[in-house]
Image: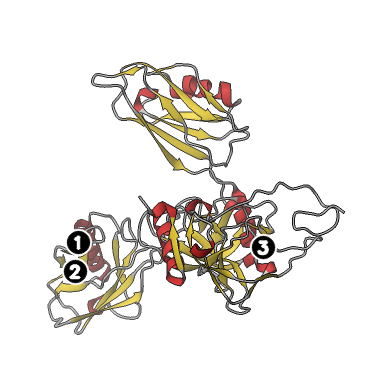
Amino acid sequence: MPTDFRGIPGVSAGRSLVFRNIFVQNAANQVTYAPQMGTIGGASSRDPESVPVSLLRAGLLMGKITATGKFAPAIIGLTGKATTGSTQINCLTTAQATELARRQGASGTFKLTGPPTAGGTVRTATVTYSSIGGGSAANEVQTVSWDVTPTGGTFTITARKSDGTDITTAAIAFGATCSTTVTNALNALLGTSAVAVTASSSTTADNGFYITFSGTGYLALEQPMVTINSASLTSATTVPVATFVETTKGVPAANTITVTATSVNEVQRVTFAIASTGGNVAITYTDPTTGGLRTTGPAAWNATDSTYLSAINAALDLATGVSGGIVATAASQIDTDLGFVLTFSGTGYAGLPHPLVFVSTLPTSSTSSVVTRTTAGVDGRFAKGSLIQPTDGSCAPLFPLVRENGTDVTDMDGVSIDQPLMQYLRGADLIAANIVNLTEGDASVQTWLKAQLKSVGFFTFDNDRV
């Protein structure tokens, strides 16, 4: 009788099976297993990038659900682009967004683990979300710039078609008009209106240009980076070399997660022991860029509260070099002569924690001041390639699955079933590229994941060796 890929008797749809080994050397004396048994929770476990998703690949990182003690994937997906702390986060793929909705619900919370900026310090935040999908799609935008300005010759652009094949344009003159000549050269091969090309400055390609993928088959999808052959270009000094930057990652609306803003502005309150009657006030704060202390110029006291606050804000703007970087407003239920509120809400200050300021020059009559933090600033930025994780306790990775042909967590009818785990990995020399999600995220996230595994077992990784 025919059997399906799990060895269960009966007729089933054909599937391709690829064996996946995660060990550098699969020798028994170099692999350590924990002796205790466990269970993979079928209802909580899917592998979004596997086919079918119920087939958990070798290398999938597993954690333990606190309430049930069952094991489940520690990572649901990765962020597809950096978030600034706003109300939208993007999954790397639609399949991962679908798994987030299936596992955590159409709304709820998830863990977000990553650094605020690429290569930064990894931390974890609990994010509240209201919906998945239906957000703002984004078209891929790639920026092409030259190390020196071309003055003659031609170049070609190589890009990938929606069917996966690569195309190379005919020679394009160094000073070609971007909106017509360069755009037409690409669209002639990619498809009508596949892309729109605009110049970085002026109108011609010698100033650099942007390629926006906005047509059928390219709309709201991530695209491979274009390449440019500039060997036939000339300049006053040397052959111009092109650099490429993914300015905006193409993201389908289905990948978007609408969240409560992850950034919180710092708010501090300055209170004087005695009401001010004259003189000046000066505030010393910590510069968020250098970490050094900076002091505002003197702001003159005024009997009119709005005039007094205006003077303080002018002094703050001058010191920070940012309009509205730190904003002084009236404190509720007290006169401004007795204190005011500082909100860190401008460019370079918003959505960040800040040390307490102190009053370095007291106004007349005031003998002392107290500064209290009423709202702690929270850095809600997360770099592209941060981890989207569950909130049931399984977010802490304990081990990778090892079964080379995968572990299925559904029965013949597609109903979730728990699977026994006779023993799980506690030490091995691992192929990093075959550990799911390990080499896809931000570099600091990769380091964090390795450290997590090393903290619970005797794991080493092939890409750590020179």
Which amino acid, by three-letter code, is at mark 3? Answer: Arg
- Quarter of the image with the N terminus is bottom right
Residue that label 2 marks = 283
Q: Is residue 205 above or below residue 106?
A: above
CB contact under 8 Å: marks 2 and 3: no
CB contact under 8 Å: marks 1 and 2: yes
Name the residue: 43% across, 53% down.
462
Q: Nearer the viewer, residue 246 or 455?
A: 455
- The residue at the far bottom in this view is 273
Residue that label 3 marks = 102
Closer to the eye: label 3 or 1: 3
Residue 122, position as x, y percentages in the image: 39, 63
CB contact under 8 Å: marks 3 and 1: no
Q: Spatial distance from mark 2 to mark 3, Cα to Cα? A: 51 Å
Which amino acid, by three-letter code, is at mark 1? Answer: Ala
Residue that label 1 marks = 315
Disc 2 element: strand
Residue 90, position as x, y percentages in the image: 53, 53
For disc 3, the neighbor class at 10 Å (few under 14, some 14 to 19, many from 20) is: few
Residue 410, position as x, y percentages in the image: 74, 63
